[in-house]
Image (spheres, grey):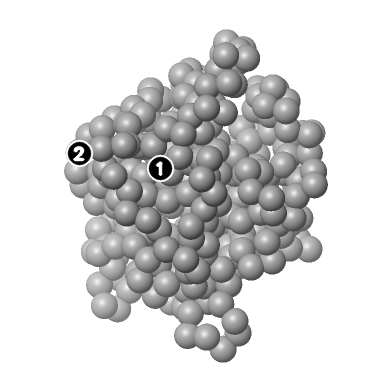
Amino acid sequence: MASVSQDQIQKFHRDGFLVLEGFFSTEECDSMRSQIQGIIEGMEVPPHCRTEFSTREEEQLQAQGSSDYFLTSGDKIRFFFEKGVLDKKGNFLIPKEKSISKIGHALHAYDPVFKQITHSSKVQELGRKLGLERPVVVQSMYIFKQPGIGGEVTPHQDATFLHTEPLGRILGFWIALEDATQENGCLWFIPGSHTNGITRRMVRAPSGASTCVEFVGSEPAYDDSQFIPLPIKKGGLILIHGEVVHKSELNSSESSRHAFTFHVMEAKGTTWSKENWLQPTPELPFPSLYT
């Protein structure tokens, strides 16, 4: 992996994202893929926990909001499923390994392979290049984007879900474990859209509410023509500013689009919102990125 230049870092600050092809080796990608295979083989999902993952707001509230399973997944390794893969009784209509949407949110803490990748020396070096003084890892996810059914992720900003005071302290690392193409649902970004703050937040609902989370504010209507696609080869890394607007389309192809992603917060001078769905726990305080 070539060292990241000051030009590239300036580009990141200008666009709100940065594509670094070939950041991870084929071997590193394959080690993550085989590790996740083992995790799925050992997966036991209680039927009441079979939360289908959705990014449409009402469905988000209904599926995740009424579900303690999602809210308490910050310090665990848990499973979330695509829409339409379960029958009314909660049984799988297709093989379980083809039905998973994502696994989250603490792979970086509890799985040796993902922990090693998250804290790898090249990630730490990149953090230092970006000027991060006290970065901590807040969450991680393995995303499957299954062939034919991998759902779209509507335009959003990560800071909607991971709010900090001040803003600008969240950074996503998105690693392609397979080639991401326009056909199989690569990421799309609006360059420069990280400079206008955020318009929507997902917060914990007051106790006694019918859902566990609710949205405050609303997502504006974005102009589709402003998005640019970022296809990327296996092993590539996309750095994602917490306020840049991005999305991905439905995967209508016959190939999956696996990715491992984690989020880092600059903890120096930063307050993590008590209203975020994700909270550090006594079992898992947010670990330092630097080891």
The three-letter code of the residue at mark 1 reads His
Q: In which quarter of the view is residue 257 placed?
A: top left
Q: Which is more foreground, mark 1 or mark 2? A: 1
Kindly tell me whether residue 47 is visible in this rendering: no
| C-alpha distance separating marks 1 and 2 | 20 Å
Q: From what the image shows, is residue 36 above or below residue 273? A: above
- The residue that mark 2 highlights is 253
Q: Is residue 206 left or right of residue 285?
A: left
Give me the disc on residue 134. Answer: none
Q: In which quarter of the view is residue 77 placed?
A: bottom right
Taking the view exactly as shown, the residue that stands out farthest to the bottom is 208
Counting from the top left corner in percent of width and height, residue 200 is at 48, 60
Q: Is residue 196 left or right of residue 155?
A: right
Quadrant in the picture for the C terminus = top right
Counting from the top left corner in percent of width and height, residue 132 is at 73, 33
Counting from the top left corner in percent of width and height, residue 182 is at 26, 32
Counting from the top left corner in percent of width and height, residue 52 is at 37, 65
For image coordinates 76% across by 46% down, the residue present is: 267
Q: Is residue 43 left or right of residue 120?
A: left
Q: Camera-side residue: 94 or 252?
A: 252
Quadrant in the picture for the N terminus = top right
In the rendered picture of this protein, how many numbered marks are placed on residues? 2
Q: Camera-side residue: 61 or 42?
A: 61
The three-letter code of the residue at mark 2 reads Ser
Q: From what the image shows, is residue 265 above or below residue 213? A: above
- The residue that mark 1 highlights is 246
Kindly tell me whether residue 194 is visible in this rendering: yes
Disc 2 is placed on an element classified as loop
Q: In which quarter of the view is residue 113 placed?
A: top right
For image coordinates 59% across by 21% down, the residue present is: 9
